[in-house]
Image: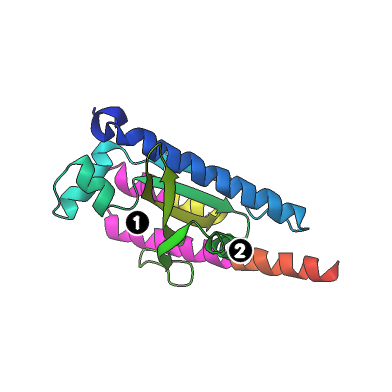
Amino acid sequence: MESLEDFYKDSLVILESVEKELLLRIDLLRHYYVLSGHTDPVEHCKSRIKTPYSMKEKLKRKGLEQTVEVALSEVYDAVGIRIVCQFVDDVYQMVELLKKQDDIKIINEKDYIANPKDNGYRSYHVIVSIPIHLSDFTKEMYAEIQIRTIAMDSWAALEHELRYKHTIPNAKMLAKELKRCADEIASTDLTLQTIRNVIIESE
């Protein structure tokens, strides 16, 4: 299996810098938000650099040449950050905090919480560009940040495991059941948010 180093070559260190910089920035935002008297909006963060196999598959689907040069200029999620929050309001709070960063540019955003995918998938996706300062120049790099609740994250992980890791004899029935589960989880998320709001207002 092709390694990250074999595919990305010298660009790997830049991708790793993007990953570290975004994680550091998110951690800093969390700390300052707590210092201002708020509750930490983040449960935990995950990150990854897209594997050569996944990247080449995406380039192939897009009808693009499967090279690192094309990958880094035409595909925006070579670096992926996932921010997992406890409550729905925390998701939107993190989106607003990211938008206030002067050197992080929002390239695109998709609210799959307000507008879920047909299969029930919910999350908030943001494509950002961030400057990486090298010895003699600054390079703008892209990354995708996904922000979702714990419940949404659990559903997405299980949905991926069930749909893509096994041969499914009753795919339509399973898709229907997964959609039903997603809707129930979304309803639970909203109920938990309401309970939280009631508790906060009573303090």
Q: Amino acid at mark 2?
A: Gln
- Which residue is tagged 2? 93
Q: Considering the image in quadrants, where does the C terminus appear?
A: bottom right
Q: Amino acid at mark 1?
A: Leu
Cα separation, mark 2 vs mark 1, equals 34 Å
Q: Which segment is the magenta one?
A: 158-187
The relative height of residue 24 versus residue 114 in the rendered view (above or below) is above
| Camera-nearest residue between 46 and 29 | 29
Local SS, label 2: helix
Q: Considering the image in quadrants, where does the N terminus appear?
A: top left
> Which-is-in-front pick, marks 2 and 1?
2
Question: Residue 5, image x and y in percent?
Answer: 30, 28
Q: Main secondary structure of the magenta part?
A: helix
Crowd around label 1: few <14 · some 14–19 · many ≥20 (10 Å): some
The relative height of residue 195 versus residue 50 in the rendered view (above or below) is below
Q: Is residue 184 magenta?
A: yes
| Camera-nearest residue between 133 and 68 | 133
Give the farthest residue toward the right.
Answer: 203
Q: Say how the picture is coloured.
A: rainbow
In the visual, does 38 lie left or right of 159? right
In the visual, does 100 lie left or right of 60? right
Q: Can the viewer see residue 168 in this picture? A: no
- Which residue is tagged 1? 174
